[in-house]
Image (cartoon, rainbow, N blue to C red):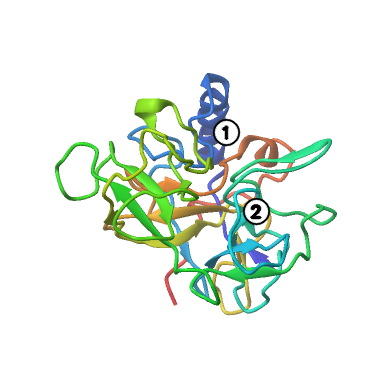
Amino acid sequence: MRSLPFSRTALTVLVLALAASSASGDSDEYGSKVELGDPDMGLALSPFYVSPEFAFWDKNENERLDPDEVVYLNINPTDDVVSENDVRLTDFVNPPTTYHAGSQVSIGDFDLGRKLIKFGTAKNPRAELRYIDMDDKGPYSFEDEIYLIAEPVEVSQGDIRITGFLPSSYVPGSRVTAGEDDISHKTLTLPGMLSFLNKNGDINNGGYAIYDKGDVVYIDTQYPFYVVTVNDVRLSDLDWVPILMEGLMPPESTSFPSVEAP
């Protein structure tokens, strides 16, 4: 396994910027949107070999999504189980441990290896990413709130807030329940694709990026694709500082990681 070259100077600047960002709050966490000046703005994104799919752990084996069941981004949809580096889209509590929405599954986690059911199979409608047109402008924009919707057209019970719902302080990863302020809002299909930030620079022998521990998944919403741009959405937490400060600084070079789409 090889790593793509980084610029030592650029990485130092990036570490300082991210440290300042981390100190100021949770702006780079799951469900946050990229803004001008964010430290990941303009970095290269990489495509997945196989498109990840939305799935859930069917705890009670009734083949339908229930309110207490965890939803995942299944990175390798051919395995049908919770695997290392899958991303939790809702919180999962296994006392005394809480696995937060946006966290990657790790070796030793309680949910590792649990059977997954894909949306769009058996008793479950297909799930898709959609948005509420909060500013009434039509096309997707920064103010719009994003959901994982199982019943298209409007927000319904059990849908998942990806970006939260700011007017009512509903947080990313929360589930919509009866009587809440965003229920029954009309939705539109979100443009874009899922891509990832190859944070550690790992590539395979063919020169393509490998998605693994610490990499960050984005909803890549607009042209130019495969680049972090304003309004893109982080589907996992951006946590650069611990990795870059642990002595893993790559050798001297002149470029940020860059991988062309296959």
Could you tell me residue 169's position as x and y percent? Answer: 44, 26
Q: Is residue 141 left or right of residue 54?
A: left
Hey, which quadrant is residue 188 in on the image? bottom left
Q: Is residue 226 left or right of residue 217?
A: left
Nearer to me, 146 or 232: 146
Could you tell me residue 90's position as x and y percent? Answer: 59, 47
Residue at (64, 53) in percent of width and height: 70
Judging from the image, what secondary structure is the residue with disc 1 in? helix
In the rendered image, which residue does mark 2 sit on? 69
Judging from the image, what secondary structure is the residue with disc 2 in? loop
Q: In this orientation, does residue 258 appear?
A: no
Amino acid type indicated by mark 1: Val
Residue at (62, 72) in percent of width and height: 76
Cα distance, mark 2 to mark 1?
36 Å
In the rendered image, which residue does mark 1 sit on? 15
Could you tell me residue 132's position as x and y percent? Answer: 29, 45
Amino acid type indicated by mark 2: Glu
Quadrant including the N terminus: bottom right
Give above or below for 48 relative to 252.
Answer: below
Instruction: Kindly identify which numbered label has been placed on residue 89.
Output: none
Query: Sequence order check: which comes first, mark 2 or mark 1?
Result: 1
Q: In this orientation, does residue 72 appear?
A: yes
Residue contact at pointers 2 and 1, CB within 8 angstroms? no
